[in-house]
Each structure stands twice: as structure tokens, then as C-alpha cells.
Image (cartoon, rainbow, N blue to C red):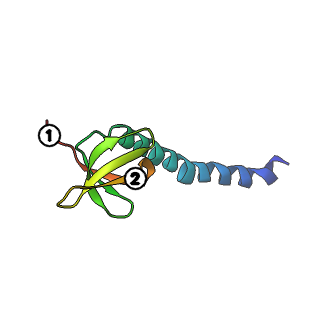
Amino acid sequence: MLSSFLPLIIMIVVFYFLIIMPQKKKDKKFKEMVAALEKGDTVITIGGIEGKVAQIKDTTITLEVGADNTKIVFHKWAIKDVMQKEKA
């Protein structure tokens, strides 16, 4: 009976190590990146908009974009990458 379930158990273990574990690491890295955001950081959104962080709230971030510093509000999950930290 165990021999009939062994292939299924092996597939579950393989899926865990190939799919679930790397996704958890990616999610943890993203949460750390968003938590470390500070006013003045340059970020890129998932839509490709590059801007400077003007304000951070619980679930939203206000970015200044363009030459006239237009302010746009985004949800934190819409941030794709931090390009540079502002030098102190």
C-alpha cells in the first residue's frame, strides 16, 4: 500500500521545493523591500512609472513623477523595485 502512495508523496515534496519554497522567499524579500522604503527613494511601479517617494502611509505610497513633480498615489503592492536610496 505504501508503494502506491510513494510516487504521490515524492511529487508533493518536489513541488514544495521547486514551487512553494522559492515563492515564499520571493514574497519575504518583497515585504522587506516595501517595509524599508523611505521618503526620497526612487522606485519603479509595476506599470513602469519611475518616481520619487514623497509620502508613505499604511497601504499607499505617494510618488512624485515628471519635471513638475506631479504626485500620484499607488498601493504598496504596485511597487516593483527600488532603484536607488537617497544619499544622506
- In the displayed structure, 34 sits above or below 80; it is above
Q: Residue 52 carries which label?
A: none
Left or right, 21 with respect to 69, comes to: right
Q: Is mark 1 on a helix, strand or loop?
A: loop
Q: Nearer the viewer, residue 3 or 55?
A: 55
Q: Which mark is residue 87?
A: 1
- In the displayed structure, 46 sits above or below 86; it is below
Q: Which of 29 and 58 is in front in this view?
A: 58
Query: Whole-percent x and y of residue 33?
Result: 36, 42
Mark 1 is on which residue type?
A: Lys
Query: Whole-percent x and y of residue 60?
Result: 41, 45
Left or right, 26 with respect to 55, comes to: right
Q: Do the residues labelled 2 and 1 touch (CB within 8 Å)?
A: no
Query: Whole-percent x and y of residue 42?
Result: 24, 50
Q: Residue 74 carries which label?
A: 2
Q: In which quarter of the image is residue 36?
A: top left
Q: Furthest residue to the bottom?
A: 48
Left or right, 25 with respect to 83, comes to: right
Q: Nearer the viewer, mark 2 or mark 1?
A: 2
x 63%, y 48%: residue = 13
Q: Quadrant of the C terminus?
A: top left
